Image (tube, grey):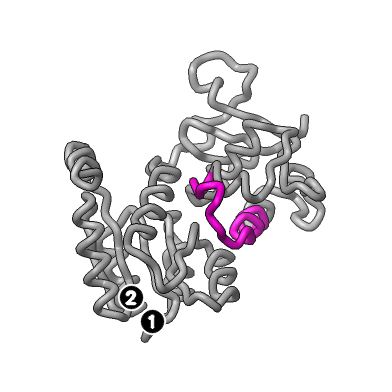
Amino acid sequence: MAENEELQEMSEGETRQKILVADDEASIRRILETRLKMVGYDVVVAEDGEEAVEVFNKTNPDLVVLDVMMPKMDGYGVTREIRRTSDVPIIILTALGDVSERITGLELGADDYVIKPFSPKELEARVKAVLRRTISKDVIIPASSSSGSTSGSGKNAKNIITTGAIKIDTARRQVFRKNERIRLTGMEFSLLELLVNNSGQAYSRNEILQHVWSYPADHRIDTRVVDVHISRLRSKLEADPTNPELILTARGIGYMFQRIN
């Protein structure tokens, strides 16, 4: 009943979101394609890394589900190719014991991971959570159109947060350093938004996973997902990522944002 209601809700929207599933195991492709279509998504599939890149470029999906170990080009190579031109959310599928696979995938720009073997319901939940956090389309707005500060007038100024040389447009989900746009993935922006909107408040890794990734409090996951995303944010925002001034480590707790005048 719940699945039928969700399908009806998604079908009544203006467009159906499209998901690319790339996995060399035919059974996994078939199961995920069937399940994701049942809950209202359009699905395209690929059976190897090269085909995944080709299908991605042709179909422009809203999210990619990507196996790490694939022939012709592995999931890391596919992630690199996608991240050259797109911030589309990526969920990687990785084996249970391969922690290094998860970390490498996240460092390359993946937004989340699901461990094999997994239940289709688990993947559906992760897809829904990531899409909800990255729903805004990546429309390029000239920096001059988004410049300003919170002291300006007009509706746009209310959405601009300025800290040092960084300007954050929360409405357009875009970040600028002076007049240069800094490209963030949807999950990176959601993490930044949480910290910025609560400047000076320290969040634990588990709290961040709950707020940004929508993981339930009792869900067990490697909290290094947060550490990798923090590292990626620092590399993009901080003048010296090894000595951060904006995104600080709150020892014994987690992370916090510090505004600079």
SS for callout 2: loop
Decide which of 66, 87 is in the foreground and name it.
Answer: 66
The crowd level at tag 2 (other Cα within 10 Å; few <14, some 14-19, many 20+) is many
Which numbered disc, 2 or 1, marks the residue that appears first in the sequence? 2
Highlighted range, magenta: 212-231
Q: Residue furthest top?
A: 153
Circles 2 and 1 in contact, beta carbons < 8 Å: yes
Residue type at mark 1: give it.
Answer: Met
Task: Give amino acid for label 2.
Answer: Asp
In the image, is residue 60 above or below residue 172? below
The residue lying at 22 percent from left, 38 percent from top is: 9
Residue 78 location, quadrant: bottom left
Percent coordinates x, y for residue 163 in the rendering: 70, 33
Q: Position of residue 144 (x, y in %)?
A: 53, 32
**Residue holding disc 1:** 70
Q: Residues within 10 Å of mark 1 (few under 14, many from 20)?
A: many
Q: Position of residue 143 (x, y in %)?
A: 53, 36
Separation of disc 2 and disc 1 at Cα?
7 Å
Give above or below for 140 relative to 72.
above
- Identified at 62% across, 21% down, the residue is 150
The image's mark for residue 23 is 2
In the image, taking residue 225 as reference, residue 55 lies left or right, namely left
Q: State which quarter of the image contains the C terminus.
A: top right
Q: Which residue is pictured at 75% across the width and 33% down the height?
A: 200
Q: Which quadrant: the N terminus? A: top left
